[in-house]
Image: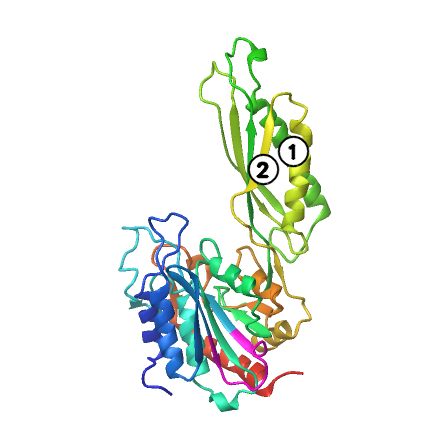
Amino acid sequence: MSPLVPEVIPMIRALIARPSVSCTDPRMDQSNLEVIHLLAGWLESLGFAVEVLPVSQNKANLLARLGGTGEAGEGLVLAGHSDTVPFDEGAWSMDPFAGLERDGRLYGLGSCDMKAFFAVAIAAARRFEAKALRHPLTLLATADEESSMSGARSLLASQLRPGRYAVIGEPTGMRPVRMHKGVMMESIRIFGHAGHSSDPSLGANAIEGMQAALRELLAWRQELQARYRNPQFHIPVPTLNLGSIHGGDNPNRICAHCETQIDIRPLPGMQPQALRDAMAERLARVVAEYPGLRLEVSPLFEGLPPFETPADATLVRSFEELTGQAAGSVAFGTEAPFLSLLGTETVVWGPGDIEQAHQPDEFLSLDRIAPTVDLLSRLIQRFCVDVPS
């Protein structure tokens, strides 16, 4: 045990104390390098071989490996994101970066989602000597999960499989999760031609085209929900939400531009690009019935694919055996699809509760720490020391 690595609760406090907000608003976006370098120092002192992998000018991933005589793409990965969401000034009853303990809880931004997971993962790892690990133990910390997922996308682009099995320590209340829906956010714009409202022939009204497009979207939603269903999810069908609409500027002008933005949550097995193509084709057909209008459909971000690890997968069965709970689903998204695309069998499991994430006075219950360290230790033993066939 290295004296340079603190005990688990001081580790959590040190991670919380280093702000690493990621945000789509550049005014609030921050670097994650302080967190990455802190983890790198601890892991190097424990004998890990550490790589800091740049993602952008001030963002990086961390990949650290301990032991193993086999290929680097084998063994167990303990993974998480190093960033947090922004916090509401004045809404916290304490300093969000202090890591205060109170009433059996440890409070702080990232305590639940999900900096504490790195500390418990390191606490589990330090129970093992490198020479005892037949397959490597890997710790992965990514950038920007809370905004663009650029860290996970960068890892996928490198086509570097971090390990054969992975645990992502998102807040699942210590329940194993093997699937979640995807996330798509799309912009639908219709362009027309302005003119005086007293004579419709002077223009082409974008709002009239949009109302036809909206009817088509709702009909398509009904078809998708009739075709796709998964009872493992609380909402067992794909969803399509009409999130915003903006068009026109004055009652006496023919509207020249209208935009709506939608959110689609596809089930596992549904392909985001195929959905995007089908939607664009249907909308183009209905808008074409309105002379003078032009349609533009584009994603608001790259999208997150759905995630599913098979129920009979080795890691899923191990989690169910060790926890006594059936692996299920969650409504929120994670980086799991990207690890799956790299060929890494993935389960999402962590000590926090999603009800505490992204809220003022975020906390982690202290009684979750020891059981989490124990279960991660048993996984390391099983997948890095005993090594399943």
Helix, strand or loop: magenta stretch: loop
The magenta stretch is: 64-77
Residue 108 lies within the magenta run:
no
- The numbered mark, 2 or 1, whose residue comes first in the sequence reads 1
Q: Secondary structure at mark 2?
A: strand
Mark 1 — residue?
Answer: 283
Q: Quadrant of the C terminus?
A: bottom right
Q: Quadrant of residue 365?
A: bottom left
Other residues around mark 2 within 10 Å, as few (<14) / some (14–19) / many (≥20): many
Residue 76 lies within the magenta run:
yes
287, above or below 310, in the image? above
The residue under label 2 is which amino acid type? Answer: Val
In the rendered structure, the answer to whether residue 147 lies left or right of residue 92 reads right
- Near-viewer residue (361 or 122): 122
Discs 2/1, front: 2
Q: CA distance from mark 2 to mark 1?
A: 9 Å
107, above or below 280, in the image? below
- Near-viewer residue (203 or 348): 203
